[in-house]
Image (spheres, grey):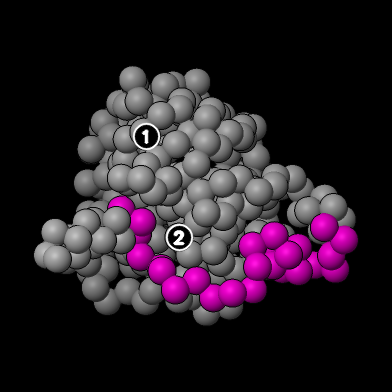
Amino acid sequence: MVEVKDLVKSFGHFNAVDNISFKVAPGERFALLGPNGAGKSTTIKMLTTLLKPTSGNLYLNSHDVIKDKALARKSFGIVFQDPSVDTEMTAYENMQLHAILYNVPSKELNTRIKDLLELVELWDRKDSLVRNFSGGMKRRLEIARGLVHHPKILFLDEPTVGLDAQTRNLLWDYVNKLSAEKNMTIFFTTHYLEEAETNADRIAIIDHGQLLTIGTPSKLIKDSKSKSLEEAYLKLTGKAVRDEQANPHDAWRERQRARSMR
């Protein structure tokens, strides 16, 4: 369902993603983990056509992401790390706009929206302005919106940041239900390692743009002779706090700007 071959993304002389390859099967729940600046979001941006690779190949649902962008985009839904719903519109209007943009047949539009808003327990708030929603409600709406065109793959880029434990658990209940009932492939990043250990079928760990390891949570723990996924993760990536948390593209541009001012 997802195939990455020899993927590279360079910003000047800096490789944000450095020759990584992996595959994700249909219906699999796959987590891409790594410290800040490791290359996770850059990889997702390339997979979702927001960023062009320097080299390598990407396929979603057998569609070439570089050559067949339109078909690739129809294959996935995405929940971004930063909120992206329109807060000046109602929940229903957000769903309706997304459905129209993805050419959802008009005869199916209302039924799909109702079913999805009921799934995430927001149907009773369909006519409420999103600016009055809590952070958890906005996340649930983003998941529903990302599913309105019936994608084969759902990308979640740190979807539970800032949410309380109860809302996080509820969100993962929705996601796991979708994966099981619809055979939907779930591709996610998170800094909450317990989320990955509980909800991922397989985990890939990336650091400094390079793929360090890939396997089931239990395999990663066993292979690293660790007692938990967190311990295995820290053995691979180290315990030092990463200072640079910005997008590598922004960091590279800032260095270029600083050099030009010398």
Looking at the picture, tell me which residue is in the foreground, 133 or 108.
133
The reply, left or right, for residue 168 in relation to residue 133 is right
Highlighted magenta segment, given as a residue range:
224-250
Q: Name the kind of residue labelled 1 in the image.
A: Pro
In percent of width and height, residue 144 lies at 41, 52
The N terminus, quarter of image: top right
Looking at the picture, tell me which residue is in the foreground, 133 or 226.
226
Dot 1 crowding, Cα within 10 Å, few <14, some 14–19, many 20+: many
Looking at the picture, tell me which residue is in the foreground, 41 or 143.
41
Dot 2 crowding, Cα within 10 Å, few <14, some 14–19, many 20+: many
Secondary element at tag 2: loop
Which residue corresponds to the image point at 43% horizontal and 52% vertical from the top-left?
A: 41
Residue 138 forms part of the magenta stretch: no
- Mark pair 2, 1: CA separation: 17 Å
Q: Name the kind of residue labelled 2 in the image.
A: Gly
Q: Earlier in the sequence, mark 2 or mark 1?
A: 2
Report the residue that reaches farthest toward the left: 261
Report the residue that reaches farthest toward the front: 262
Q: Is residue 220 above or below residue 65?
A: below
Residue under label 2: 37
Residue 89: give its label: none
Looking at the picture, tell me which residue is in the foreground, 249 or 221.
249
Query: Does any portion of residue 254 appear in the rendered image?
Result: yes
The reply, left or right, for residue 160 in relation to residue 23 is left
**The quarter of the displayed image where residue 140 is located:** bottom left
Which residue corresponds to the image point at 48% horizontal and 34% vertical from the top-left?
A: 7
Residue under label 1: 53
Secondary element at tag 1: loop
Q: Is residue 159 above or below residue 114?
A: below
The C terminus, quarter of image: bottom left
In percent of width and height, residue 95 lies at 29, 50
Query: Does any portion of residue 150 appear in the rendered image?
Result: no
